[in-house]
Each structure stands twice: as structure tokens, then as C-alpha cells.
Image (spheres, rainbow, N blue to C red):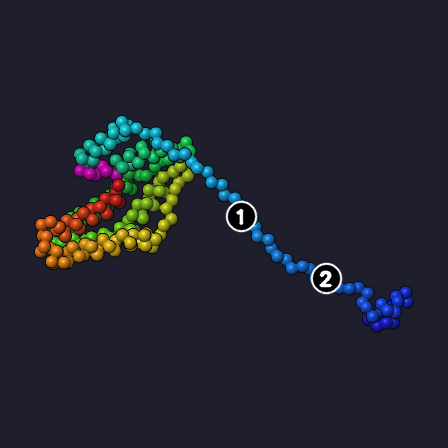
Amino acid sequence: MSEDDYPATVPAELRSEPIFAPPPPPPAFTPRPMPMPEISHRKLRIAFTGSGSEYFRIWIVNLLLTLVTFGLYYPWAKVRRLRYFYGNTLVDGEPLGFHGNAFKMFKGFLLVAAFFGLYSVAGKVSPMASFVAFLVIAALWPALFKSAMQFRLANTSWRGLRFGFTGSIRDAYTACLPLFVPSVMLLGVLLLAPEMQQAAPAKAPSGLWLSIFGAVMLFTLVV
């Protein structure tokens, strides 16, 4: 803007300055972090209201029916046992619930029984066959145990809410790896070291150790 464009009332010393100064730039906006909601923690009281006499009646019936059916009644016995213990376990005054289906558990029981039967037959063939069967069970055990945990927790409820197990197959094998590697190495030494078998053939037969380890692993799946 030239000096002739200014009004006559504007002094000459101010005519070199703009009439309207540009507004200052707005301050930079810095977003404030959102406050995290406070999570309240509350301790829940856990109590068990069952008695030994009540459970004894359930236990003795389960035992007799399991013996009479040559073990086939075991899934139904397990359902009765879990429902008794869960129903008498109070968390904040509310009992737990178990909703497992005995027929579905029976399918898993047959699978474990088949593994145990094959393992027993392999042990009678040779120690090497027993060791191979042990390796197969060790390779499948984390996946089977994960499936058992998923079934158990998915059928457990509290106040109408079902539990859940979100662990993956990879997590299951990672968690079991520190246990199985030393066990396999130990059993391999007992099986393949001829000096150990010659030094104490009657005291520590390798097939016995394989049977013990394999039976314990299979037992944990059905307990």
C-alpha cells in the first residue's frame, strides 16, 4: 500500500506501517495424554464347604463302577468328582460350576487308553521300541495337555461366566521343552549305554524307567 492510499487523518510516520497487522500464529497444539482408568482390585474369599463323608460316598461308588466296567466308567466318575468339588468351592460366596459332557470326555479317554496300550505293547517288544513310543508320546503330550486344559476351563463357570484357556500350541511346547529335553536325554543314556546295562542289569532296566515316565505322562491327561 502506497502513502497516497492512506487516509489524511493518518499521521505520516505511521503510513509506512500496515494498517492491519496479521494475527499471531496459533500456539502449537500438544495433545494431553488421556488418564488411564483406575483398576480396582478386590480380594475374593474362597471357601470349600464339602465334607469327607460326602465325598467318600461319591468316591466308593465311582471306584466300584470303574472296576465293574473295567475302567470304562472313568469319564463319568470324573464328571461326578469335579462337579462335587466345583459345586462346593465358593468364590465370593458363589460356587463354581462344571459343565463337562461325559461322552466327550469318553472320546479323550479312549484316545489316551489307545496310547497307553500301544506304549505297553512296545515295552514288551524291546527297550528300543519302548523308547520310540516314549518319544512319540512326548511329542504329542503338550498338544494333548493343551486340549485337555481348554476343555476343562471352557466347561468351568462362575456366576454364569465361562472360563477360557488362550494358550497356543507353540506356548505349550515352549513351556514343556525344559522338562522333556532332560528326560529324553536321561532315558536315552539308560537305554543306549551298554556299560550301564552290564553293570546293573537287574537293578535299573531301561524298560522300567520308560514305563514309569510314559505312565506318568499319560496319567496327567486323565486325572
The residue range painted magenta reads: 70-75
User: Residue 108, how many percent across, how many down?
Assistant: 26, 44
**In terms of depth relative to the viewer, which is nearer, 64 or 31?**
31
Q: Amino acid at mark 2?
A: Pro
Indicate left or right for 58 with 19 as reference: left
Badge 2 density bin: few <14, some 14–19, many ≥20, Cα 10 Å: few
Find disc 2 in the rendering and name its residue: 24
Which badge, 1 or 2, comes first in the chain's sequence?
A: 2
Q: Is residue 71 magenta?
A: yes
| Residue at 29% from the left image edge and 42% from the top image edge | 104
The one of 142 and 47 positioned closer to us in this rendering: 47
Q: Quadrant of residue 24?
A: bottom right
Residue carrying label 1: 36
Q: Main secondary structure of the magenta part?
A: loop
Return the mark for residue 100: none
Q: Quadrant of the N terminus?
A: bottom right
* Residue at 40% from the left image edge and 37% from the top image edge: 158
On the rendered structure, is 90 left or right of 201? right
How far is the residue under mark 1 from the one under mark 2? 35 Å
Q: Quadrant of residue 197?
A: bottom left
Note whether residue 123 is visible: no
**x, y (%) of residue 41?**
47, 40
Which residue sits at x=31%, y=48%?
146
User: Residue 15: x, y in percent?
Assistant: 85, 69
In the picture provided, is 11 more to the left or to the right than 140?
right
| Residue furthest out toward the right | 8
Q: Magenta includes 10?
A: no
SS of the residue at dot 2? Answer: loop
